[in-house]
Image (cartoon, helix red, strand yellow):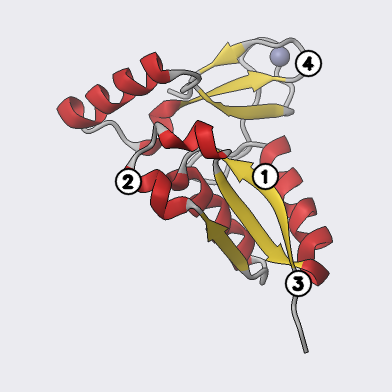
Amino acid sequence: MTETFKTIARIQYSSEAQIIKGRLEAEGIEVFLSDNLTIDTDPLVSNAIGGVKLKVLSHQSEDAKEILESIRKYSMDDEGNSISCPNCHNEKIELFSTIKDAKSLIWFIFGVLFSGLPFYTRHKYRCETCQTEFDLK
Ligand SMILES: [Zn+2]
């Protein structure tokens, strides 16, 4: 019996990919990451090779996509509470990485080295309804 794989997402940073992998595995989906070792060695390579590829078994790909979608659609805080927009209180909040270019990546690395910033401070949240961007306090 041969199993085939499907790439369901490309993620720029392997730490993010690891978190998403954990969420999918908690739902019983087998997840395979590729290129994450290369990216760990040199994060700047990530863009060039298209990020970490998140692969799942073909027959689980539909389920995996659904879970992925629910993770992306409704962000939650560390306690698992859903996050609502400080402006319009809508709960359709999108999580996005604040690291968009090499410059912000360098600032992020400084942050990690000198103040031990935890993972989530790299992220901002954006309301899908009114486009307000905010941080969690
Ligand atoms: Zn809003």
Gap in Å between the C-alphas at discs 4 and 3?
38 Å
Q: Label 1 belongs to which residue?
A: 71
Gap in Å between the C-alphas at discs 2 and 1?
27 Å
Q: Amino acid at mark 1?
A: Ile
Name the mark nearer the viewer: 2 or 1.
2
Say left or right for 37 vs 30: left
Upstream in sequence: badge 4 or badge 1: 1
- For the residues labelled 3 and 2, say whether their Cβ atoms are less than 8 Å apart: no
Label 3 near ligand 1 (CB < 8 Å): no
Gap in Å between the C-alphas at discs 4 and 1?
18 Å
Label 4 near ligand 1 (CB < 8 Å): yes
Residue in view at x 40 percent, y 54 percent = 37
Gap in Å between the C-alphas at discs 2 and 4?
38 Å
Name the mark nearer the viewer: 4 or 3.
3
Q: Residues within 10 Å of mark 1 (few under 14, many from 20)?
A: some
Q: Position of residue 17 (x, y in %)?
A: 52, 49
Q: Amino acid at mark 2?
A: Thr
Quadrant for residue 60, please give it.
Answer: bottom right
Q: Residues within 10 Å of mark 3 (few under 14, many from 20)?
A: few
Element type at mark 1: helix
Label 1 near ligand 1 (CB < 8 Å): no
Q: Residue placed farthest to the front in the image? A: 48
Quadrant for residue 109, please give it.
Answer: top left
Q: Position of residue 83 (x, y in %)?
A: 61, 31
Label 2 near ligand 1 (CB < 8 Å): no
Name the mark nearer the viewer: 2 or 4.
2
Q: Label 3 belongs to which residue?
A: 4
Q: Label 2 belongs to which residue?
A: 41
Upstream in sequence: badge 4 or badge 3: 3
Q: Label 4 belongs to which residue?
A: 129
